Image: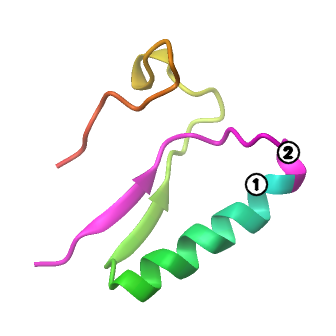
Amino acid sequence: MRLGTHIISFDHPDGAAGLGPRLADVGAAAEAAGVGWLSVMDHYFQPAIAHDRRGRVVTALV
């Protein structure tokens, strides 16, 4: 079985300038952990249902 990771949030405290380096870090960590694939949400506007009031992800993809 291969497991993957799907990133649904594009928020970063440093804004757009910090997003690229952070995604590179996540990709390197996923590869080191043996994750089969890494994907990102393909919607520019992020659906509010994916996060609760504290910003935590409340959905899961299986």
Residue at image location 44% in from the left, 29% down from the top: 56
Relative to 58, 44 lies left or right: right
Farthest residue, direction right:
17
The Cα–Cα distance between marks 1 and 2, rounded to whole angstroms, is 7 Å
Rendered image quadrant of residue 42:
top right
Badge 1 or badge 2: first in the primary sequence: 2
Residue at image location 43% in from the left, 17% down from the top: 52
| SS for callout 1 | helix
Return the x and y of residue 58 as percentages of the image width and height: 33, 27
Reply above or below: 38 against 44.
below
Q: Nearer the viewer, mark 1 or mark 2?
A: 2
Relative to 50, 58 lies left or right: left
- Disc ID at residue 14: 2
Rendered image quadrant of residue 13:
top right
- Mark 1 touching mark 2, by CB under 8 A? yes
Is 59 a magenta residue? no
- Disc ID at residue 19: 1
Is 12 a magenta residue? yes
Amino acid residing under circle 1 = Leu
